[in-house]
Amino acid sequence: MTPRADQIPADELLTAPDGRLGPHSSPEVRSRIALFASGAYFMVPDGDNHIEVQSVLAVARRYHIDPQEPVVVDKGVLTGIYHKRQVLPLNDKTADTGDGAQSKRKDAYDLLVKARKLHGTSDIIIKCDRDEAGVYAILDGVQVSFNKRPWSPDYAALFQKAIYTWAGLEGAAERGWKQGAHQVGAITSGLPEGLDSVRLQLLASAFDGRELIIRLMPKPKGGRIELRDLGFNAEQISRFAGIMQNSGGIVIVTGPTGGGKTTTLHGLLSLSLDLFTGDRWITVEDPVEIRRRHPNVTQIDVVRTAVDDDTDHAYDDSLTAAMRSIPRRLLFGEIRSEASAAIAVRAALTGHGVLTTLHTDDAPGAIPRLLDMGISPNMLRNPKLVRAVTAQRLLRQLCSCRIRITRRDWTTFCPLWLERIFADIGNVHMPNPTPCAHCRAGYRIGRVPITEIMIPDERLLSLLIDGQRDTATNYWKAECGGLPIVDQALQGIVEGTFDPMEVIRCLDF
């Protein structure tokens, strides 16, 4: 039906990009519903039969807005409602919103094109304060200057705001631009060819400064992430396949920020979808970084369900909602609190397979970390709870133009390193100070993962729970086939694959 003009309320259109629910309302939501502050509610047929719409309605109720019985309309009427309110068209991501946002958004697009062409770029960083500004790239894990032309602080600040507003128009950013606040967001449409999405992290820095980190998420080959494309070998993939065949329990991926945890997590999800084609997956992420175009995967973006920027509360709420949505398996972006740890454990103990990440240095460290987060020792002693923990680091490999380390170079390293590495100095190499045309500063372009996989038994769990870390590590290596990251890195040094300084930079000894 088409409502009369007097049937369309004059109060606030909550789901408009600039409405109170705008940050939670994606273009997909706006193509299905229009919700007003009075509770008046227009939707297309079956428009509320969509998880994002249900999330927005739940957020509205938390604002004490009770949606009325919906008026069913066609899609063209919804478009007209949004146009009548002079908000951005549903398919327009480039309309100007003031402060030169349109031109800055074009500049942002061009910057992403430039970054995409430079292989190995994972992040762009835009820094500014009251006096200066700079643009940098994280290239193969190392920060380098990215823009030859200097930026003024005013230009950089407007540039940051334009990109964040771009995310806000998709409903994938925390409420509004707030100077002096830490904020997150994501962009998933209108991006250059080859980019699937970008993640935004805004940091408030000293001297009235802001730093914007733009994480680039490339489109995977063939439209999906495969472990082999991430650098995992056949033996590791076979072990992962065995792990993912368990019907329940938690599989944890650990490592530092920027170490590829999320990508590996989604590689494991792809592997599971191949093994069990009928399993229903629900993912909860903050924000969603990798879009899964699969009918059996439903993704919940926490940013769109948060009220008043309370993303921690929204994250825990989203985990609980996912548990109630008849999943067979769950992907939780991170165990970040006692509440999220408890939910992950409850899911695993009720027969759900759980994939998640945790911030620890190595695989054995995940068990003490869960203890610190309130999981009882008795639960953790059950090997059916934590099925496996994998830890990884991304390292640059030396180019074939490498040079041998000489005794004169030994002074660079501490005595511990001399003892552990240089027992066989004959094949230890370092980057060539005059690199060839085929490498980047003496390293091959790109990085490779070194990965440890821990499948704990009851004995190993007990040793870790009781704080006997050294004994646990020795048992893991001798009885469970464990091969720690450190041992793999040292072997790579002796074989001439890794530069000792690269290993020192990336690993904790």
Image: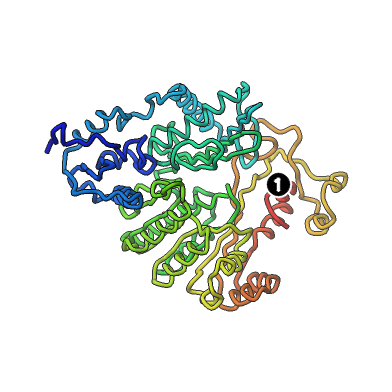
Give coordinates of residue 342: x percent, y percent: 48, 67
Q: Amino acid at mark 1?
A: Glu
Specify whether 36 is left or right of 363: left
* 5 up-or-down from 488: above or below: above
Q: Which residue is mark 1?
A: 502
Give coordinates of residue 415: x percent, y percent: 85, 56
Q: How many other residues sit within 10 Å of disc 1, few (<14), some (14-19) or many (≥20)?
A: some
Residue in the picture at 40% in, 26% down: 97
Looking at the rendered structure, the secondary structure element under dot 1 is helix
The residue lying toward the viewer, choosing from 427 and 328, is 328
Q: Is residue 474 visible?
A: yes
Quadrant location of residue 363? bottom right
Residue in the picture at 19% in, 34% down: 77
Residue found at the very far left of the displayed protein: 1
Give coordinates of residue 38: x percent, y percent: 25, 43
Specify whether 17 is left or right of 454: left
Residue in the picture at 63% in, 64% down: 483
Give coordinates of residue 319: x percent, y percent: 41, 59
* 33 up-or-down from 277: above or below: above
Specify whether 249 is left or right of 463: left
Q: Is residue 246 visible?
A: no
* 308 up-or-down from 123: above or below: below
For the N terminus, which image quadrant? top left
For the C terminus, which image quadrant? bottom right
The residue lying toward the viewer, choosing from 473 and 340, is 340
Counting labels gives 1
